[in-house]
Amino acid sequence: MRRDRLYQAGSLAVPLLAWQLAAGVFGLVSPSLLPPPLTIAETTATLLTQEGFRSDVLVTLQRTLVASLVGSTLGTVVGLAMGWNPQIKAVLSPLAAAIFPLPMIALLPLVILLLGSTETALVVTAGLGTFFVVLWNAMDGASGIESVHVDVARDNGATSTYRLFREVLLPGSLPLVLVGLRLGLSTSLLIVVAVELVAGGSGLGNFLWIAWMSYDITALYAGLVVSAVLGIAFTYGLGAIERRLVPWHADNRRTVVL
């Protein structure tokens, strides 16, 4: 475990050191195109003291969490139903398979047209991305439950659908559901920032667009750094929850791909 952490730290430290030397010491690359990491860090620290930038970060964070909560909840329910019931899977799988590969940001104009609110459309678009990521993982988790576990539960009095869901379906599917939640939250952040770039108004995506249009390259990198930090926090935060809830699965994670 300690060696893995050293490898992880090194995978970040070595490229950053090389970048700093190339851009900040030896001048091998133009600082106007690739500012040194220390310069970006200073700019990031300065931006975080500004209320406007903090507001953009909080707006993006709020949109991401709302979209992820709605999308992951619906994705879990529908995915478990599809994995548990072959008839439901047969009906919904073709539709889900058709929509899943679409770039969610391409659906934004249609969602705005249907809902009439850019803010709601942004959250719905990001929620759709999360929905499908969680759906496939939840479906695979439910379909992997062996029938013997259901039979044992029924023999012990779990005859109602609710008890089977609570005592068999959810616990048996939980490892892959948590994997889906972890991936879905990162997907939601990615889509939110991308939509903010297009829709404008507020958020980290809007900040990145303004920095680009004003050719403030250092601020652009600083915004990307904050976005990356949020993504890392989501990944490791949910990873810690996964290790706590399903420790037997944490060391053997697998991602379901359609």
Image: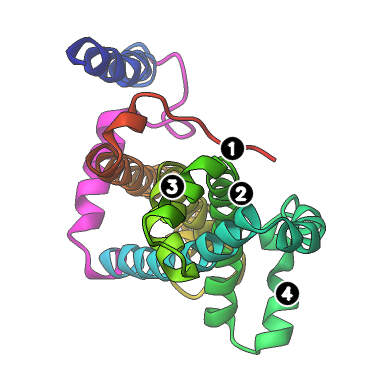
Determine the image quadrant of residue 79.
bottom right
Residue type marked 4? Pro
Q: Residues within 10 Å of mark 1 (few under 14, many from 20)?
A: some
N-terminal-most mark, 2 or 4: 4
Q: Which numbered disc, 4 or 3, marks the residue that appears first in the sequence? A: 4
Question: Which residue is pictured at 52% across the width and 72% down the height?
Answer: 123
Pointers 2 and 4 in contact (CB under 8 A)?
A: no
Q: Nearer the viewer, mark 1 or mark 4?
A: 1
Q: Amino acid at mark 1?
A: Val
The residue that label 3 is drawn on is 152
**Residue placed under numbered mark 4 in the picture:** 109
Mark 2 to mark 1 CA distance (whole Å):
7 Å
**Front position among marks 4 and 3:** 3
Amino acid at circle 2: Trp
x and y, in percent, of residue 12 in the image: 32, 21
Q: Marks 2 and 1: CB-CB under 8 Å?
A: yes
* Residue 203 in view (yes/no): no
Residue 183 or residue 83, whichever sits in front: 83
Give coordinates of residue 86: x percent, y percent: 72, 55
Q: Which mark is residue 117?
A: none
Per the model, the C-alpha gap separating discs 2 and 4 is: 26 Å
The residue pinned by badge 1 equals 256
> Element under label 1?
loop
Nearer to the camera, 243 or 187: 243
**Which residue is more in the foreground, 80 or 195?**
80
Residue carrying label 2: 136
Above or below, 250 against 134 in this view is: above
Task: Tell me, yes or no, whether the two marked residues, 3 and 1, touch with CB atoms within 8 Å.
Answer: no
Q: Residues within 10 Å of mark 3 (few under 14, many from 20)?
A: few
